Image (spheres, rainbow, N blue to C red):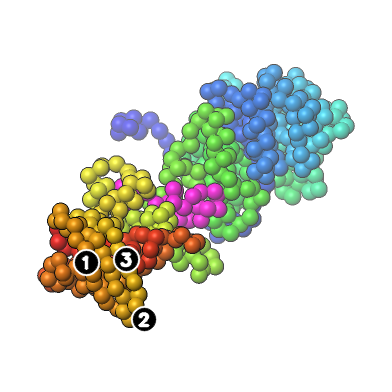
Amino acid sequence: MRPESVSKYKPFPKVELPDRQWPDREITEAPIWCSVDLRDGNQALINPMTVDQKVEMFKVLVAIGFKQIEVGFPSASDTEFEFMRRLVDEGLIPDDVTLQVLVQAREHLIKRTFESLEGVPQAIVHLYNSTSTLQRKITFRDASMEDIKKIAVEGTKIVKGLVPTLPGTKVRFQYSPESFSDTELPFALEVCEAVQAVWQPTAEEPMIMNLPATVEWSTPNVHADQIEWFSRNLKDRESVLISLHTHNDRGTGVAATELGLMAGADRVEGTLFGNGERTGNLDIVTVALNMNSHGVQTGLDFSNLKEIRDVYERLTELPVHPRQPYAGDLVFTAFSGSHQDAIKKGMDRMDEEEKWGVPYLTIDPKDIGRNYSKDIIRINSQSGKGGMAYILQTEYGLDIPDKMKQVVGNTLSHFADEKGTEIEPVEVYEAFCSNFVNSEAPLKLEQCKVIRESDDHVDCFATVVYKGEELELKGSGNGPINAFVNILTQLVPKDFTVSDYRAHSLNKGSDADSVDYIQIRGDDQSTHWGVGIDASIGKAGVLALITAWNKLHS
Ligand code: KIV
Ligand code: ZN
């Protein structure tokens, strides 16, 4: 924004609450959750969901564990009305799920809403009208505070009067002073208490006061102050459940909800992945998983988040951003070498630890259905030895010796640098093989037979091709590697020693491949690693030795 434009705006007023208590509180238990995907979320879509799509989304929400679901605005469109009928007629409403329906404080709309509830066992009728200064002035053309309060009170009376028309339905009541976030607090309280006086809720049968941040105008601490102020000043607080409904205009909808819970709210409305008007509603997935990550149970199950996301993207036609907390493709991924190294070390330690503690990862990606090898470590030119080793180990079972990792990391980084884009695990493997495994030049092993004569005597009979010539050679030693060192000295006078060695099997089972890693040190003090992979243990060692020797001699 240009500096001269900034002067057009004014600071948001603070709440006078010097003894505010929320900053010292922690979130230790989950609120009542209400999904508004099928209403607020649906209202914000380019192509609102069809009845079939709403049914599919409803089933997903039920499977996640939502017990309160705002299913729509049945007086607003035939689709919404028809959807209600489908839920009832096809018996899709579980016994423990309450349907919530939104309605403006207007008689004919309230009546139509009640008609839509025919046959619904448990319902929340959600009445709203706008209360803020801006809405009173602009939308309602300078309506007075009294006029606005009257709309709320009259609407509540109509809802109350219609309850007996639904004898088979347990009707609960919710009121939203829409645009609460920029309503003068004493006025919001006055309207809500007037509504409360009509409805007459009790501690046993509380009503819901939903306090929407219809537009997020302030920092989340101001939202928390508003909620704490309201909660502390409301009469008969125990007869009311305070509900949060944050939008995300400033990008802090999640923070506002979390601080609002600390400020005393009992209930949270939001949507999957934050879909909703403008910058969206509160992202319930993030808030719930944030709680899980602090050891708090939520009653919501996001263990198959990828599948939930797939359905969501299909039905809303909105993509989930790759950096969206928990759900985005890249949110557990480390490309950078130092991060990869720390993650690998952390993952290796997890077997011994009781509580989660892996650098850079707030939760175990597996707990929400993510895949370690595909999601956590991906390789590009920023990556390092830890990441390469991790891919080779998790995808291909290669447990590279620590001392070899740096050399492998350097080689593969160079490869990634040249390619300039991400390299897939298979490319990591292929680059590793072409640089370190079973090399054939200048020396190629054609055949090799290892005969163990005694515990400390092995004969090795080998057919090799060296500098274009096929040779049949025999060497002896106390093991296959020593025996082959003896063969190599027949080709070139001995100019190295074996300085490191490690072997493991590649697969479990009888036809396991053996992997041998050998480091040799040349007389010139240079070191070279070679890897041999073969079904025969003895031959794998020989191939590793040849590969290292080829590096010294090429
Ligand atoms: O954001 C809002 O104020 C709303 C109300 C209708 C609750 O969605
Ligand atoms: Zn909303």
Residue farthest front in this picture: 472
State the CA–CA distance, disc 1 to disc 2.
22 Å
Give the residue drawn at x 65%, y 31%. 56
Say above or below: 477 vs 549.
below
Q: Main secondary structure of the magenta part?
A: loop
- Above or below for 355 versus 327: below
Q: Is mark 3 within 8 Å of ligand 2?
A: no
Image height of 484 relative to 413, above or below: below
Q: Mark 1 and ligand 2: say if the CB distance to the nearest ligand atom is below 8 Å.
A: no
First in sequence: mark 1 vs mark 3: 3
Could you tell me how far apart the alpha carbons at marks 1 and 3 are, in whole angstroms? Answer: 11 Å
Judged left or right of residue 345, residue 80 is: right
- Residue shown at 38%/30% (left/top)? 8
- On whether residue 85 falls in the magenta region, the answer is no
For label 2, the residue is 455
Task: Read off the residue under disc 1.
Answer: 473
Magenta region: 358-383
Q: Secondary structure at mark 1?
A: strand
- Expressed as whole percent of the image width and height from the top left, the position of residue 99 reads 73, 35
Quarter in which the N terminus is drawn: top left
Residue 42 figure quarter:
top right
Q: Residues within 10 Å of mark 3 (few under 14, many from 20)?
A: some
Q: Which residue is mark 3?
A: 449
Q: Is residue 25 left or right of residue 495?
A: right
Instruction: Identify the residue at image location x=52%, y=53%.
Output: 366
Disc 3 is placed on an element classified as strand
